[in-house]
Image (cartoon, rainbow, N blue to C red):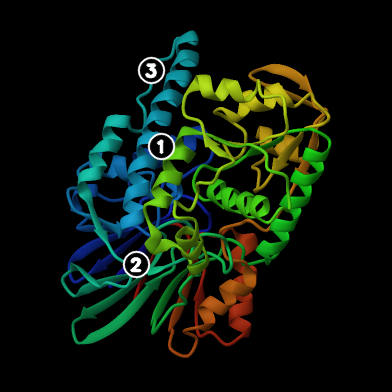
Amino acid sequence: MKIKFYGAARTVTGSMHLLEINGSRILLECGLFQGKRNETYERNRHFPFDPSKIDAVLLSHAHIDHSGNLPNLVKQGYEGEITATRATTHLVKLMLRDSGHIQESDIAYVNKKRAKKGLPPMEPLYTLEDAEKVAGHFNSVEYDAPVEIAEGVRATFMDAGHILGSASIALDIKEDERSFRIWFSGDIGRRDLPILRDPVLPINADYLLMESTYGDKGHRPPYLAYEELRAVVQKTIERGGKVIIPSFAVGRTQELAVFLHQMIKKGEIPSVPVYVDSPLAINASQIFNEHPECMDVETLADIRARGHAALDFKEISYTRSVAESKAINEYQGSAIIISASGMAEAGRILHHLRNNVGNPRNTILIVGWQAPHTLGRRLADREREIKIFGEKFYRQAEVATIGGLSAHAGRDMLIEYASAVKKQVKKVFLVHGEERGALPLKKELEMQGFKEVIYPEKASVFEI
């Protein structure tokens, strides 16, 4: 069989790997490549293979850098099934519709600028209608339940503990006279994060395709992130301010909701309103509540004790309408506002920042990595003068940052993950990692005695 690495090869985006086995072509992931606009448009629009010749697609989880180019795949001729866990299927349908809307909105903005320059309009990468057509291709499976994907290929989805529904995929293959197992990690989660179960370590793998995002460093324990969050919220409430949190809609928002509920329930912070102001985050939170099979024992016990959903509690409000969103800024007391986007580049968070950035009683809380040149990065860098909707504002609100909430495994966990199959594994392929993360991990695994650790280049092909 052959493995062709077309995406998330020496980078952390656009995950896409093609397996050729027994005459079948199986695609692991179909993610959007994210980067400079011109490069991403062309790369995502043109596949390095004929989509109509793909026989099956396996999807590890719902994040757009793993699933976001499925509408284009179907649009260009793919007719087969997309196999994923039930929760991933549920989330992806929601996220692809949102992505289709964004593609249309972004290209409309681009075309306005092109029209002023006398340039012809461009087409969106795909539309909302294209995204909705993907829904009919999903084959939803349970964790730990083997399913036949193609001749001689059986897939089993194991909990990866990264986001709701995330999975590592074990492929048991019979080819000619031999049998072997390929284990694709997907994105590996962490232990002791709220809501989700811990990741399952690989079992009996002959070949391991493993992410390497944070192969160069570890993470602070989640309990330290909890304490940092509690301290920031307590300090802000004591001075009568609001906490404004730009947050990703899927995963991070739900973790914050659980932490804040625990703090209020224990009396660690006062009972104040908690607003989740993002339609996508609200829809995602409802999906979380519908999938107890993904939840850890602590979350399930809490649901049973309270008699209602994991992400619902007295103080939390989920605001859908624009009118409800505007009303939040009229509230005079202390409150916690969680809103998308995670890097403060678009969406309702911009309105909350505009209304609150000039008040020294308030805190803007940064809870994740911020890409260069984003508003989130400028806030994280404590810049005083910022622009929101093209208007200049002088920041007087405090800015706080907390780490430890990453949903990706750190260096120690990655080493432990690979070490689970050290005695058996013949080759380890490091994907989904830039050089700064992957190369130190590669070196460490080699020093620990792994036979062959490969960091494949884009479009490289390996026969196994």
Q: Please, is residue 264 above or below residue 128 in the view? A: below
Q: Amino acid at mark 3?
A: Pro
Q: Nearer the viewer, residue 341 or 281?
A: 281
Residue under the image location 45 percent in, 62 percent down: 295
Q: If the image is split into quadrants, where does the N terminus sit?
A: bottom left
Quarter occupied by residue 120:
top left
Q: Position of residue 236 (x, y in %)?
A: 79, 39
- At x 67% / y 53%, what residue is drawn? 263
Q: Can residue 373 be seen in the rendering of this structure?
A: no
Q: Are circles 1 and 2 on residues that touch, CB within 8 Å?
A: no
Residue in the foreground of this view, choosing between 101 and 304: 304
Question: Residue tagged by mark 3?
Answer: 121
Q: Quadrant of the C terminus?
A: bottom left
Reply above or below: 288 against 101.
below
Report the residue marked by disc 1: 42
Q: Is residue 216 left or right of residue 302?
A: right
Residues at marks 1 and 3 touching, judged by CB atoms closer than 8 Å: no
Other-residue count near label 3 (Cα within 10 Å), few / some / many at <14 / 14–19 / ≥20: some
204 versus 392 height, above or below: below
Give the residue number, with chain letter if any, for mark 2: 3
Give left or right: position of 139 versus 191: left
Please state which amino acid type lies under the numbered disc 1.
Answer: Glu
Which is nearer the N-term, disc 3 or disc 2?
2
Q: Is residue 245 above or below residue 432?
A: above
